[in-house]
Structure formats: structure tokens, C-alpha cells
Image (spheres, grey):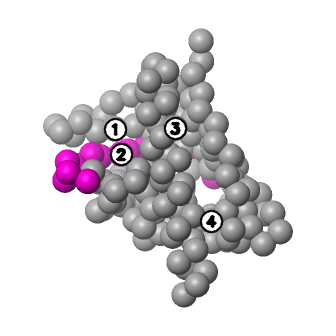
Amino acid sequence: MTLELVIERRFSAPLDLVWDAWSSPDSKVGWWGPEGFTCDLNEMDFREGGRYRCEMRDPDGTRLVNIGGYTEIRPKTRIVMTHGWEDADGKAGPESLIELEFEADGDGTKMRFKQSGFESVEERDGHREGWTEAFDDLDRALARVLVA
């Protein structure tokens, strides 16, 4: 059985801005992670074959390190990347696969997010909660940029 997570969202922001949120390290710092988490350090080599590493802190201050790599990038259309966690000793755990598709939709952007490779329903559902909260944060971050 393949466990997948699919989330479809429409953001009230132009495609260029949504794409930048995924492709720019500075933009990711403002929204990456579940509600209440901060992305304190984001290292990105946004190119096919490049890697990323984001050091997050949960509301209690616990440090979590999210890592992965980019396997396919089609500008403003598609990103395929891996997603995993690094333990306290710096050892990488298993990585899941994320496929993102973007489409301009009037004055907004449609995004389709698919993550696969979960080891359990609980893991998948936990990621659904975390990504939903992150995308809520992204929506708020995009709105702040549009108002500025």
C-alpha cells in the first residue's frame, strides 16, 4: 500500500510570488513549518541536484532539522523534491518524495502538493496537519507582501 498526501490550495497571490516563496531561501524563512514553528536557518541550493536544510524550532524551543534535495525544477510550473529529517547527531533519516505543481489562476495561484513514501497512516496524517498549517502561514506571508 502506498501512502500519499495530496493538498490542493489556491493562494490570492500571483504565480511569481508563490514560486518565490518556494525557491528563495529568504522567503521560506517566513512560513516554513507548522503553526508556531520558526525556520531559524535556511540553506538552499535551488537547482536540480541541489540540497536544502532548514533548522526549525517548535514553540517549546526544540530544534528540528528538515533536509532534502531537488530532483526536478520546471520554473513556475513544477518542483520535485525529497523531504526528511536529520537527528540530533546529524544523521539523515529516510526521505519522502514531494511533487509540487503551480498554475496561474486569474489574480491568484493554484498549487497541488503531493507527498508520498510514508511509513504509516499516522506519519501521513501528521504531515497533513503540519503542511496545512505551513500553507496557512504561507497564505498570511503572501498577503503581507501584497499589502507592503
**Tag 2, which secondary structure?**
strand
Amino acid residing under circle 1: Trp
Q: Amino acid at mark 3?
A: Arg
Residue 136: % across, % down: 53, 57
* Residue displayed at 50% across by 46% down: 131
Q: Counting other residues with Cα less than 10 Å from the Cα at mark 4, is it few (<14), some (14-19), or many (20 or more)? A: many
Which residue is identified by label 4?
Answer: 18
The three-letter amino acid code for the residue at tag 4 is Val
* Magenta-drawn stretch contains 91: no
User: Magenta residues, as a range?
Assistant: 59-73
The overriding secondary structure of the stretch rendered in magenta is strand
- Where, by quadrant of the figure, is residue 71 drawn? top right
Residue 66 colored in magenta in the image: yes
Q: Is residue 47 above or below residue 107?
A: above
Whole-angstrom CA distance, mark 3 to mark 4, is 20 Å
Tell me the CA gap for discs 4 and 2. 21 Å
State whether residue 27 is above or below residue 87: below
Instruction: List the residue tagged with mark 2.
Output: 66
> Disc 1 marks which residue?
85
Q: Position of residue 119 (x, y in %)?
A: 45, 19
